[in-house]
Image: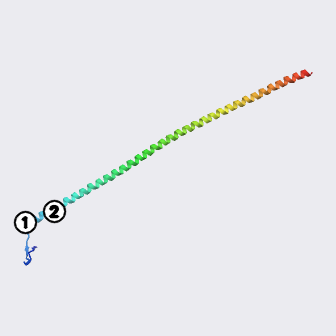
Amino acid sequence: MVTRTQMLPPGQTVRSVELAPSASDLSDIERKLDLWSRQLNSNIIDEISRLRIKLLENARHKLQTTESRHAGEINTMYNELEGLKELLHTYEVSIERKDGVISNLTRSLQNQKEKFDTMKTFTDWKLQFAAKKQEVCVCVLTAALSAALY
C-alpha cells in the first residue's frame, strides 16, 4: 500500500489516503524501470566505449611519442656514426700521409747513405791514388836526386 500526503493551506487538516496500486500503474512502473534500466545500460556501455577509445588513443599517442623519440635517437646515432666515419676517413688519410712522409724520409736517408758511401769510396780511392802518385813522384825525385848526386 502506498500512502500519499498532500500539503494543504494553513487551517485545513491533512488527510492521508491509502491507495492500492493498480495493474496499469504497476505495468507503467515496470515499463519506466525497464526504460531506465535500458538507458542506464546504454549509458554504461557508452561510457565504457568512450573510456576504451580514450585508452586506445592514449596508448596510440604514447606509442607515437615513443616511436618519434626512438626515431630521433636513431637519427642522432646515425649522425654520430657518419661523423665517426668521417673522422675515421680523416685519420686514415692522415696515417697514409704520415706513412708517405716516413717512406720518403727513409728513401731520402737511404739515398744519403748511398751517396755518403760513394763519396767515402771515392775519397778513399782519391787518397790512395794521390798517395801512390806521391810515392811515384818521391821515387822519381829520389832516383833523380840519386842520379844527380852520383
For label 2, the crowd category at 10 Å Cα-Cα, with few meaning under 14, some 14 to 19 and many 20 or more, is: few
Is residue 99 left or right of 20 when viewed as pictured? Answer: right
State the image coordinates of residue 5 (x, y, percent, origin top left).
10, 74
State the residue in front, 52 or 142: 142
Residue at (19% x, 60% y) in the render: 41
Residue at (80% x, 25% y) in the render: 133
Is residue 18 left or right of 86 when viewed as pictured? Answer: left
In the structure shown, which secondary structural element does the residue marked by tag 1 occupy? helix
The quadrant in which the N terminus is found is bottom left
The quadrant in which the C terminus is found is top right
- Residue at which label 2 appears: 36
* Above or below, 121 relative to 3: above
In the structure shown, which secondary structural element does the residue marked by tag 2 occupy? helix
Q: Amino acid at mark 1?
A: Ser
Residue at (14% x, 61% y) in the render: 35
- Residue at which label 1 appears: 24
Q: CA distance from mark 2 to mark 1?
A: 18 Å
